[in-house]
Amino acid sequence: MVKSHMNRMTGGNGMLYPIIGFALCVAFIYMSFGDLWIDLHGETKLSFVERNGTQFMVDGKPFYINGWNSYWLMDHGVDESSRSRISAMLQAGAKMGLTVCRTWAFNDGGYNALQISPGRFDERVFRSLDNVIAEARKHGIRLILSLVNNLQAYGGKTQYVQWAWEEGVGLSASNDSFFYDPSILGYFKNYVKTVLTRKNTFTGIEYRDDPTIFAWELINEPRCMTDASGDTLQVFCEFLNPH
Ligand SMILES: *[C@@H]1O[C@H](CO)[C@@H](O)[C@H](O)[C@H]1NC(C)=O
Ligand SMILES: *[C@@H]1O[C@H](CO)[C@@H](O)[C@H](O)[C@H]1NC(C)=O
């Protein structure tokens, strides 16, 4: 019974199994070395997301965002023991059909700081951020990179204000001086410039030229408690986005 069934299967389609076998083999090679190819050449086909009116577009088609937030990617990638979490998280997101991940491109002062003090960077941590971006690209995920925290976690604006105090500049009494003190704005502007012009050690692409980065977020959860009108925040944004 089984034998005659087999005969029927192979009898009429003598070429079928070899063809399937060959196809599987090609698929296997592609899946095995596809990533390697990307590693060696540092590129997959990827375009910048653009805007047309209220619609995001990529390659002439609408781009829809199914996003999530994993703020910790750079931080967990510094130590080799936890680095595999980055690719696992991005892979999980990609499998769910998600397209954009928001994550921290900052850590000011403190443990695993990217910016140790104004203008001083830890190359080890920068490489971890390089890795986050390279891994996102590999998994077809785009990133929203946040540049500083309004809150105190990972340093935030309070750390900038403290740096200014320590250097005897920016002597305003309020943590909100982050938004308007010229010395502090100078620190932050220098920070933003360093990040945007960083050349990724894995892909060789400067961050500002990398279509993996969907958007930059100037600051996480900005609040200026001393000016409820919003004007101070508006001026801060315009300072960083001169037209
Ligand atoms: C932008 O949107 C407008 C209005 O929907 C449309 O007519 C135009 O073709 C779009 N342009 C591109 C480049 O897609
Ligand atoms: C700034 O914020 C920190 C943390 O909330 C607080 O400890 C500190 O007193 C604040 N500084 C000023 C000058 O308000």
Image (spheres, rainbow, N blue to C red):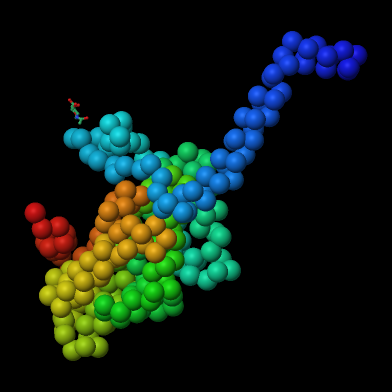
Residue 79 or 25: which is nearer the viewer? Answer: 25
Looking at the image, residue 68 sits to the left or right of residue 2; the answer is: left
User: In which quadrant of the rendered image does the C terminus lie?
Assistant: bottom left
User: In which quadrant of the rendered image does the N terminus lie?
Assistant: top right
Q: Is residue 75 visible to the viewer in this orientation of the structure?
A: yes
x, y percent for residue 150: 29, 66
The residue lying at 72 percent from left, 14 percent from top is 13
Occupied quadrant, residue 6: top right
x, y percent for residue 225: 21, 66
As drawn, 51 above or below 182: above
Occupied quadrant, residue 99: top left
Residue 135 or 13: which is nearer the viewer? Answer: 13
Residue furthest right in the image:
1
Counting every numbered tag in the picture gives: 0
x, y percent for residue 219: 27, 61
Q: Is residue 221 visible to the viewer in this orientation of the structure?
A: no
The residue lying at 68 percent from left, 29 percent from top is 21
x, y percent for residue 35: 52, 48
Looking at the image, residue 210 sits to the left or right of residue 8; the answer is: left
Residue 53 or 174: which is nearer the viewer? Answer: 53
Occupied quadrant, residue 45: top left
The residue lying at 53 percent from left, 64 percent from top is 83
The residue lying at 35 percent from left, 67 percent from top is 106
As drawn, 11 above or below 121: above
